[in-house]
Amino acid sequence: MKLIVPIKQVPETSNVKMDPETGTMVRSGVEQIINPLDLYAIEAAIRLKEKFGGEIITLTMGPPSADKALREAIAMGCDRGILLSHKDFAGADTWSTSYVLAKAIEKIGDYDVIFCGERATDGDTGQVGPGIASWLKIPFLTYVSGIDQTNQETMTVERNVEAGYQILKIQKPCLFTVVKEINFPRLPTLKGKKKARDIEIPTWTPQNIDVDPENLGLNGSPTRVVKISKPKVSREGEKLMPESDQEIEDSVGKLIEYFEKLEII
């Protein structure tokens, strides 16, 4: 069984910054980590491989430093990684990103299942996984929370929905975006870290995959951020900081009057 896990490097949530001129995320000088929700996709692939055998290939699109994310995935249990890196890929939106990843997967070929995280914590769109499936013209399911059965041709999975969950059968090859309920990601092992340190990770550019240059990067993206602004929060308030018994009594009285005015009490 050949399993593919596209992953993404994202800034730590507290360090997300945007370039107001280009509308793209500033990544230089910011600590990058594997998108936390992609870890569940990696773990789902590893567990399937442990049960049925096969190979796990992880890939990511980003700058040369993104090979760190691939090595971390290999340390967890993936077999090899592929880095998609070139200046022509820079600034891609979800449409262009899913296009490039799909073209890379087409080149890999002969795959059974593609596992993706539910969404990326920086963009928070959840569009890349379904986008890959659309480019590849394969069936996909989102919000997958469990894998019940698999055979040569189909898989039966649980999928979270608002009213509970669905049990669905899907034809292979297929793509899943998984949610946290599906598993608990493992930590990298010492053996895995040694493998990740020594393994050679190839870099693919537009010349290595059959892509249309007009679909690449910022210029090939049909959507883009045109304006960035911080929301202004204006609140009129009064701070009560009583220090004596009388001030405490007066403050309680003010609070009661305020709540009565709002008809809370």
Image: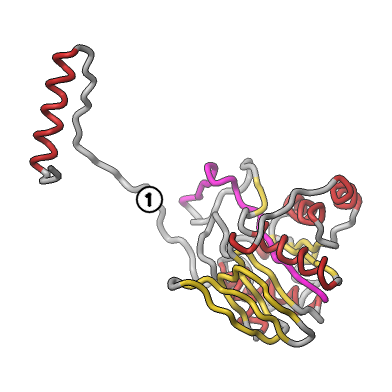
Quadrant of residue 117 within the rendered picture: bottom right
Judge by depth and name the residue closer to the eye, 131 or 93: 131
**Rendering coords of residue 189 (x, y %):** 83, 48
Quadrant of residue 119 within the rendered picture: bottom right
Query: Residue 246, relative to residue 43: is it above or below?
Result: above
Which of the image's four quarters has the C terminus? Answer: top left
Q: How many marks?
A: 1
**Residue beneath the point at 77% across and 69% down:** 48
**Rendering coords of residue 74 (x, y %):** 81, 56
Examine the structure image and report whether residue 11 is included in the region drawn in magenta: yes
**Residue beneath the point at 76% across and 50% down:** 68
Judge by depth and name the residue closer to the eye, 84 or 39: 39
**Rendering coords of residue 44 (x, y %):** 71, 65
Direction top: furthest residue: 244
Magenta stretch, residue numbers:
1-20
Relative to 75, 39 lies left or right: left
Q: How was this image coloured?
A: secondary structure
**Residue beneath the point at 67% across and 65% down:** 88
Q: Residues within 10 Å of mark 1 (few under 14, many from 20)?
A: few
Relative to 97, 229 lies left or right: left
Pointer 1 residue: 229
Q: Secondary structure at mark 1?
A: loop
Which of the image's four quarters has the N terminus? Answer: bottom right
Instruction: Name the amino acid type tagged 1.
Output: Ser
Examine the structure image and report whether residue 15 is included in the region drawn in magenta: yes
Relative to 47, 157 lies left or right: left
**Rendering coords of residue 81 (x, y %):** 81, 62
Relative to 111, 156 lies left or right: left
Judge by depth and name the residue closer to the eye, 39 or 211: 39
**Residue beneath the point at 70% across and 66% down:** 6
